[in-house]
Image (cartoon, rainbow, N blue to C red):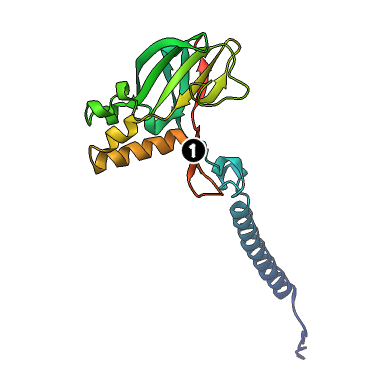
Amino acid sequence: MKITQKHESGFGTVEVLLVILILLVIGVIGYMVYHNNHKSSTASVGVTSANLPPPSGSSSNKTSTSPATDNISIAPLGISLTVPANVSDLTYAQTSTSSFNGESSVTVGISTSTLTSYGSACDASNAPLFLLTRVNGQYPANANVYNSPGILVKQFPDFYISFTPNNGQTKCAALGTAQSDTLNNELNALLRFHVSSTNGQNSSPTPEFTVHALQ
């Protein structure tokens, strides 16, 4: 009997299928790894604008620079003052009721509770800060020490308010260093002093407060 030997060359069907299966498995694994990495990177980038800090120039980072103020009513003069909050303990005392240039006037002395606590020399009746005067009519066009009671603060339709530094400042400051320092601090909060360019001396101060008519 003659035996015939069959020689096969190359890959059989099984080997080809195994190779294809391996390639498919590798492809699936690679796709899953890529998909997961892409998903996590997208999530890290996709932060909503609500979670981001606002730009440095945005309004949410801006704080108000306006100083705090308070309103003080002064009934004898029919006005209220808007003053810096650090002198909101303003006090007043009526010092006179008279006439000025034929027009009725009322004057009050101005102090603070802090100053008054130092003694009577610093209370409102001695006007350690200044005097405020209400005069009916119009402020003189050519005002001077003879025809006006002080520096114009505000002209209203039928009256005006003026202020005058008073020698009560000297009496209060003479009590001691603490009184003098407090007085100067409160004067600087309420009045702006101007230095003359000719002689280097302080000229007439201007008020740092605003005046409103009481309703």
Residue 169 horizontal/vertical position (percent): 33, 33
> Which residue sits at x=68%, y=71%?
18
Q: Is residue 165 left or right of residue 121?
A: right
Residue 191 horizontal/vertical position (percent): 46, 34
Q: Is residue 199 left or right of residue 25?
A: left
Q: Residue furthest front?
A: 146
> Which residue sits at x=25%, y=41%?
178
Residue 90 appears in view: no
Residue 16 horizontal/vertical position (percent): 73, 73
- Determine which residue is flagged by label 1: 192
**Image height of 96 relative to 202, above or below:** above
Q: Residues within 10 Å of mark 1 (few under 14, many from 20)?
A: few
Depth check: 61 or 47 in front?
A: 61
Determine the image quadrant of residue 60.
top right
Depth check: 206 or 69 in front?
A: 206
Q: Residue furthest bottom?
A: 2
Identity, as a three-letter code, of the amino acid under mark 1: Arg
Determine the image quadrant of residue 3.
bottom right
> Which residue sits at x=70%, y=75%?
15
Name the element at disc 1: strand
Q: Is residue 19 left or right of residue 47?
A: right
Residue 68 appears in view: yes
Identify the image quadrant of the N terminus.
bottom right
Q: Is residue 24 left or right of residue 79?
A: right
| Number of marks drawn | 1
Residue 173 horizontal/vertical position (percent): 29, 37
**Image height of 153 relative to 44, above or below:** above
**Image height of 25 relative to 172, above or below:** below
